[in-house]
Amino acid sequence: MPTISQRGQQMPASPIRKLVPFAEAAKARGTKVYHLNIGQPDLPTPAPFWDAVRQFCNTPVLEYSHSAGILSYRQALCDYFLRRHKLSLTPDNIIITNGGSEAVRFAMAACLNPGDEVIVPEPFYANYNSFAIESGVKIVPLTTYVTESFDLPPVEAFAACITPRTKAIILCNPSNPTGKLYSDADLAKLREIVLKHDLYLFSDEAYQEFAYDGETFRSALSLEGMEQHVVVMDTVSKRWSACGARIGAFITRNTELYNAAMRLAQARLSPPTLGQIGSQALCILPDSYYTEVQAEYVARRDTVINALQQIPGVICPRVSGAFYVMPSLPIDDSDRFCQWLLEEFSHEGYTVMMAPGTGFYATPGLGRQEVRIAYVLERQHLAHAMQCLAVALEQYPGRVAPQATAKANA
């Protein structure tokens, strides 16, 4: 029997999706599952998306698009970035991708060689681990802590991670999974490290429109002197509640890097045509759309965090971005707890599905008391889900005393 590749054996299961069979079994038993495991917004995809697709359906042939994406869509994205974020871009800075995931893959493949190292503050988006394995790249984690609101470590901590193999830093801003919105001071810290050591900065800005409490998102593309160093990974999935469109973008002002990424784009032919047609129509949504969406997510965030902070033993900082929180729970093992919720627990016919924290770390042993919660459901469902979680924590046989600090466990 032929053997599976080393890469195939090393590929981790997704903490976001690996418990799906247990959720399906719970539903088959008649248990209602609140899905807080995945960042799938329940807000409607804006109507102009569907209108544009319907109109395009009069076209007789669904053709490939340009490998870089449809020019009119790339121009529309440039107009969006200028209007919403004061970023000056041209279509030749943008390659449309099959979701934000392909943009990350392009960044790793075009910038890094097998054996190169990338520094990533952990916890981080779980699929960075998978993309690194695909590219033969080593993730070098720099741990942040729930008890410190997942603040970035000082410059010296980054410097201590740098070796001759270090080629890049990855930052998700605002953060998936923690909801951390990084400040101008944080970005200045990264700029100092990147320029001093001649690195790339991969900035995952999937949640750029989700900044709360009067805080302002700032793109890495706005950092002075970083034109040759910054790669931004963008997506329509969260911004416009269009996850299934599978449209993202690889954005850089580095011409040589852009050309290398274009060769990768040509190898996979093109991004989805229909997704681009619909997404282009959303680039001109009024500012009121974003204001309304932000207000809804602030209310959802407050529903979840206020409830979590009332549960004994739970540590949950207030966050200002994205639509995730990553609390520490008084449990022995988050993988076991999340599976137990689906296999053995229900409250009033309901249970909760969350993503175990271990899958968002590269350091072995971390995340065992943490879970990622996506507050993507309407508020009354979130409130009931938090009630279910509170009852579950009372009944869970693996409940332990809360950690004095998460850092002590590292």
Image (cartoon, helix red, strand yellow):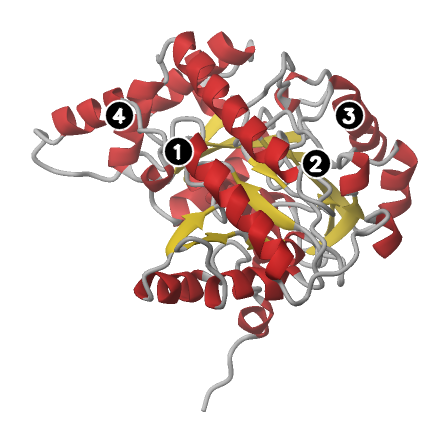
Label 2 or label 3, whichever comes before in sequence order: 3
The residue wearing badge 3 is 186
Q: Is residue 278 above or below residue 82?
A: below
The residue wearing badge 4 is 49
The residue wearing badge 1 is 68
Q: Which secondary structure lies at badge 4?
A: helix
Q: Quadrant of the C terminus?
A: bottom right
What residue is shown at x 67% (from left), y 31% (from top)? Answer: 180
Mark in front: 4 vs 1: 4
The residue wearing badge 2 is 200
Q: Position of residue 182 (x, y in %)?
A: 70, 26
Q: Is residue 173 above or below residue 367?
A: above
Q: Is residue 322 visible?
A: no
When asked about the image quadrant of residue 183, the answer is top right
Q: Amino acid at mark 2?
A: Tyr
Neighbours of disc 3 within 10 Å: few (<14), some (14-19), many (20+): some
Q: Label 4 to label 2, Cα distance in Å? A: 34 Å
Label 3 or label 4, whichever comes before in sequence order: 4
Q: Label 2 to label 3, Cα distance in Å? A: 16 Å
Q: Which secondary structure lies at badge 1?
A: loop
Q: Which secondary structure lies at badge 3?
A: helix
Mark in front: 3 vs 1: 3
Residue nearest the observer in this picture, 325 or 288: 325
Neighbours of disc 1 within 10 Å: few (<14), some (14-19), many (20+): many
Q: Position of residue 202 (x, y in %)?
A: 64, 36
Residue nearest the observer in this picture, 14 or 378: 378
Label 4 or label 1, whichever comes before in sequence order: 4
